[in-house]
Image (cartoon, helix red, strand yellow):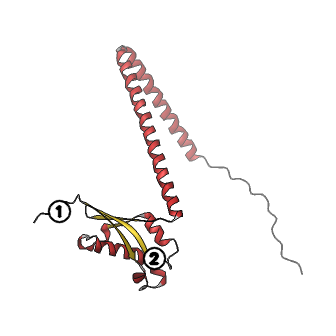
Amino acid sequence: MAEKTQTEKLEREYTIPLRTEWIKVPRYKRANKAVRAIKEFLAKHMKVENRDLNKVKVDKLLNEMVWTRGIKHPPTKIKVKAVKENGVVKVESYELSENLKFKKLKAEKLNKQAEEISSKKKAVKDKLVEEASAQKAELEDKSSGEKKEESEKKIAAVEAGKATEKENAKKSKHETKAKTPVANVQQRKALQR
């Protein structure tokens, strides 16, 4: 028999009946049971090995969709899209409500902005590295006597800065902060009869 490769991608859409499952538990556990029912249903139908629920990953927005009406009133059925890759099933909602669509778009926009910022930071970092390498090459071109003098000056400046930082830290550690005087608040007198 030919063994299936683990890189196959299996994508399916299901309408999962939840009421039959969450009706079996107390009201205060219904939404939890609904999420667990989604995982159990998909573990069965997507043929997850040993029906391991840890291999079924529920999308954040799908979870919010189950919980939107609270713990006592989860939806009676839900339409989902499931994708199985490398033995792990990822589930997301097929149809989102308006609020969740807005949240998803907002999250995507924030991710895009974060990627742009990180790319800008990388560009600045690369530029600084190039400048530093240019300065290093320039210093190598100078005579060895000048190099020693400059490096000694830099080292002396750094050591002096560290020494002053230590002194300031010691002083601030041992100084007591002056207590601010509390305004004289007139004490409340007992009511006279």
Q: Position of residue 3 (x, y in %)?
A: 14, 63
Q: Nearer the viewer, residue 185 or 126?
A: 126
Quadrant position of the C terminus in the picture = bottom right
The residue under label 1 is which amino acid type? Lys
**In the figure, residue 7 lies in which quadrant?**
bottom left
Q: Earlier in the sequence, mark 2 or mark 1?
A: 1
Residue at 55% in and 46% down: 173
Residue at 43% in and 85% down: 23
Under circle 2, the secondary element is helix
Q: Nearer the viewer, residue 139 or 118?
A: 118
Compared with 187, 108 (above or below) is above
Q: Residue furthest left?
A: 1
Compared with 39, 90 (above or below) is above
**In the figure, residue 153 lies in which quadrant?**
top left
Side (left or right) of 88 relative to 61? left
Q: Where residue 4 is drawn, which disc sits there?
A: 1
Residue at 36% in and 20% down: 137
Compared with 65, 103 (above or below) is above
Under circle 1, the secondary element is loop
Q: Position of residue 184 (x, y in %)?
A: 79, 60
The residue under label 2 is which amino acid type? Ala
Marks 2,1: beta carbons within 8 A: no
Q: Nearer the viewer, residue 114 or 183?
A: 114
Q: Which residue is mark 2?
A: 31
Badge 1 density bin: few <14, some 14–19, many ≥20, Cα 10 Å: few
Q: Position of residue 59 (x, y in %)?
A: 40, 64
* Inter-mark Cα distance, 2 to 1: 36 Å
Side (left or right) of 164 relative to 91? right
